[in-house]
């Protein structure tokens, strides 16, 4: 199965969303520690629908501590309903018995969700984009993440391959910020083992 092809086609569907208003303080009344409070960006009704959908479809439990809940939800919508990020960054993308391309009820591989490890040949392996020990996706600050997406250049100066950054680079800062916020909210994970290739079925003989 060509998951990259699927991911790239889905990537073409990434849209630009309108985020309006400012940032409001969260209302986590259960804690007096400001670091444990959430903030929420004010958004319109259309974006609110996307946010709620994004929060409901995230395949993994989210940690909202210190994060903007609305941005996390919008980021989840982009990552899980439009970007096809899991196609390349989760290895394998689906849990055993949960591959919809095989006619099975869809079940994401949550144990290795977005932890990379998929090989594309030529030494190219999808990167782990889950948070590191400091809570930074891929170990990158938002500014560094934004620079990578905008230019396609990794911190070592080399260009990203396979990753369709020329498409993602056209997104608004607000949308990429939402993606980054979602990646901060997901659990840290380790790459999974690639699935054993299934031998092709020999053609029937007359």
Image: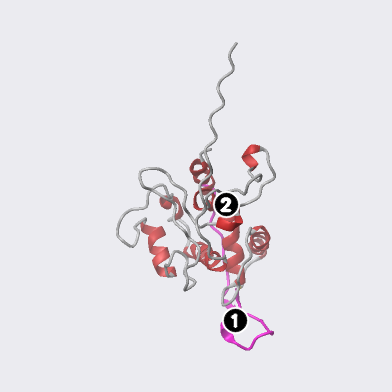
Between 105 and 117, which is closer to the camera in this rendering?
117
Above or below, comparing residue 191 to residue 173 in the picture: above
Looking at the image, is mark 2 or mark 1 earlier in the sequence? Answer: 1
Residue shown at 42%/64% (left/top)?
A: 145
Above or below, comparing residue 89 to residue 42 in the picture: above
Residue shown at 50%/57% (left/top)?
A: 115
Can you tell which quarter of the image residue 101 is in?
Answer: top right
Q: Residues within 10 Å of mark 2 (few under 14, many from 20)?
A: some
Say whether residue 166 is magenta.
no
- Quadrant showing the C terminus: top right
Disc 2 is placed on an element classified as helix
Query: Where does residue 149 sit, x and y in percent of width and height?
Result: 41, 58
Disc 1 is placed on an element classified as helix
> What secondary structure characterizes most of the magenta part?
loop
Q: Which disc is residue 82 wearing?
A: 2
Query: Where does residue 23 sit, x and y in percent of width and height?
Result: 57, 77
Q: Residues within 10 Å of mark 1 (few under 14, many from 20)?
A: some
Residue 49 seen in the current view: yes
Front tag of 2 and 1: 1
Above or below, comparing residue 7 to residue 44 in the picture: above
Question: The magenta stretch spans which residues?
Answer: 12-40
Between 103 and 202, which is closer to the camera in this rendering?
202
């Amino acid at each position: 199965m060509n998951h990259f092809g699927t991911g790239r086609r889905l990537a073409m569907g990434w849209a630009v969303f309108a985020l309006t208003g400012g940032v409001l303080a969260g209302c986590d009344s259960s804690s007096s520690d400001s670091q444990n409070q959430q903030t929420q960006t004010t958004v319109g009704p259309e974006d609110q629908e996307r946010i709620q959908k994004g929060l409901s479809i995230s395949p993994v439990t989210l940690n909202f501590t210190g994060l903007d809940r609305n941005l996390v939800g919008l980021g989840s919508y982009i990552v899980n309903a439009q970007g096809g990020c899991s196609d390349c960054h989760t290895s394998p993308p689906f849990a055993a018995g949960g591959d919809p391309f095989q006619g099975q009820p869809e079940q994401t591989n949550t144990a290795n969700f977005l932890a990379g490890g998929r090989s594309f040949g030529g030494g190219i392996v999808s990167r782990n984009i889950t948070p590191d020990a400091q809570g930074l996706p891929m170990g990158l600050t938002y500014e560094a993440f934004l620079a990578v997406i905008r230019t396609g250049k990794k911190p070592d100066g080399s260009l990203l391959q396979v990753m369709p950054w020329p498409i993602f680079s056209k997104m608004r800062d607000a949308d990429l910020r939402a993606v980054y916020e979602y990646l901060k909210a997901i659990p840290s994970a380790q790459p999974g083992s690639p699935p054993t290739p299934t031998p092709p079925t020999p053609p029937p003989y007359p």
